[in-house]
Image (spheres, rainbow, N blue to C red):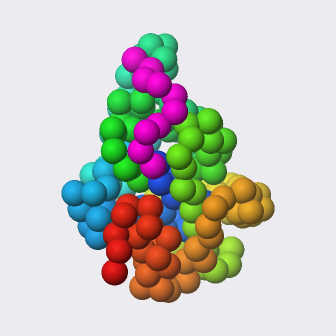
Amino acid sequence: MKPDAKRKFPLIVIAGPSGAGKDTLAKAALARYSGKLLHGQLTTTRRPRGGEENHRFVSCEQFERHEADGEFVEHAYFFGNWYGRLWSDLNDGTCVITQEVIGFNNLVSLGKLTTIFVAPPSLKVLRERLRARGTDSEEALLIRLTSAAKELRTAPDYDHMIVNGDITDSIERLFTILDPVVGIRY
């Protein structure tokens, strides 16, 4: 069921290439703004990597049913799996989501967005992070890195950019961006 496409509350979109640190930053935001910030769950057909409690893992058949019923705000096929955001997961409140660059343009029409692009300090660092995950073959790793090089060129399309070299610094930068959005005053 598709609600009014324009949101009454802010939607915070944290986007960037795989391995840039989107989920880590979103978890930090959810912890800091507990009770004031909700998480818009991601629905995907890929296998869990562990520690992804804010993802809904479904079969291809379940995903296709959601799609056929018009339940997705956006969805895309990315690196061999389907990813999507259900209308029902964009809670009626200030919400944060992590987003692959490929689906970002589908969210722009929702209005009231604060968009943050997370970039690695270099493709070399990104390669090391993706390898450390241990979830991709060398071929898949190369595809992700090629995609990341293209995605980095979209950074100017976002309201803010965080180069995630040092996670502590990146989290502090995120809080500086989000405090006014969430309504925190110090």
Q: Residue furthest left?
A: 35
**Quarter occupied by residue 26:** bottom left
Which residues make up the magenta segment?
1-10
Say which quadrant the N terminus sits in: top left
Q: Would residue 86 be found to the left or right of residue 129 on screen?
A: left
- The answer to whether 116 appears left or right of 95 in the picture is right
Give x and y (percent) for residue 57: 34, 38
- In the figure, 5 relative to 107: above or below? above
Q: Main secondary structure of the magenta part?
A: loop
Q: Residue at x 44, y 13 (%)?
A: 69
Q: Is residue 137 visible?
A: no
| Residue 117, image quadrant | bottom right
Residue 99 percent coordinates (x, y): 53, 50
Location of the C terminus (image quadrant): bottom left
Q: Is residue 42 above or below residue 179?
A: above
Residue 162 seen: yes
Residue placed at 43% from the left, 23% from the top? 3
Residue 177 in magenta? no
Q: Residue furthest top?
A: 69
The location of residue 94, given as percent across then percent down, is 37, 50
Residue drawn at x 27%, y 52% as measured from the top left: 53
Q: Could you say which is closer to the camera, residue 29 or residue 119? A: 29
* Residue drawn at 36 percent across, 55 percent down: 49
**Left or right: 164 with respect to 94?**
right
Nearer-the-camera pick, 75 or 176? 176
Q: Is residue 16 above or below residue 60?
A: below
- 8 magenta-colored: yes
Total numbered circles: 0
